[in-house]
Image (cartoon, rainbow, N blue to C red):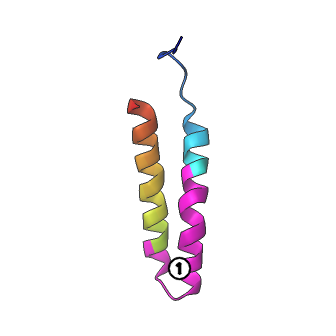
Amino acid sequence: MYNKDTKKDWLVASVTAGIGAGIPAYIAVLQGQNPLIAIAITGLAVALALVIDHFW
């Protein structure tokens, strides 16, 4: 019933993680956080989402 050989869509995982982490990072930048830190946090979230999507 459960097909473990499904194709993974890395683009969807990247966009979802980027939007999900980008919105709070944007708000944090508006409140005075360094933009480079916000970009790094968003990039880390995207990378982690891709790793989880690959191995899950």
**Label 1: which residue?**
28
Above or below, comparing residue 6 to residue 32 in the picture = above
Q: Position of residue 44 (x, y in %)?
A: 41, 57
Above or below, comparing residue 24 to residue 33 in the picture = above
Q: Is residue 25 magenta?
A: yes
Secondary structure of the residue carrying numbered label 1: helix
Q: Residue at x 40, y 40 (%)?
A: 51
Dominant secondary structure, magenta: helix
Quarter of the view holding residue 24: bottom right
Q: Is residue 52 magenta?
A: no
Q: Nearer the viewer, residue 29 or 2?
A: 2
Q: Position of residue 54 (x, y in %)?
A: 43, 32
Kind of residue at badge 1: Ala
Q: Position of residue 1 (x, y in %)?
A: 54, 11
Above or below, comparing residue 32 to residue 16 in the picture = below
Q: Position of residue 8 (x, y in %)?
A: 53, 28
Above or below, comparing residue 43 to residue 52 in the picture = below
Q: Quadrant of the C terminus?
A: top left
The residues colored magenta run: 17-37
Q: Residue at x 61, y 40 (%)?
A: 12
Q: Residue at x 53, y 71 (%)?
A: 25
Q: Nearer the viewer, residue 13 or 2?
A: 2
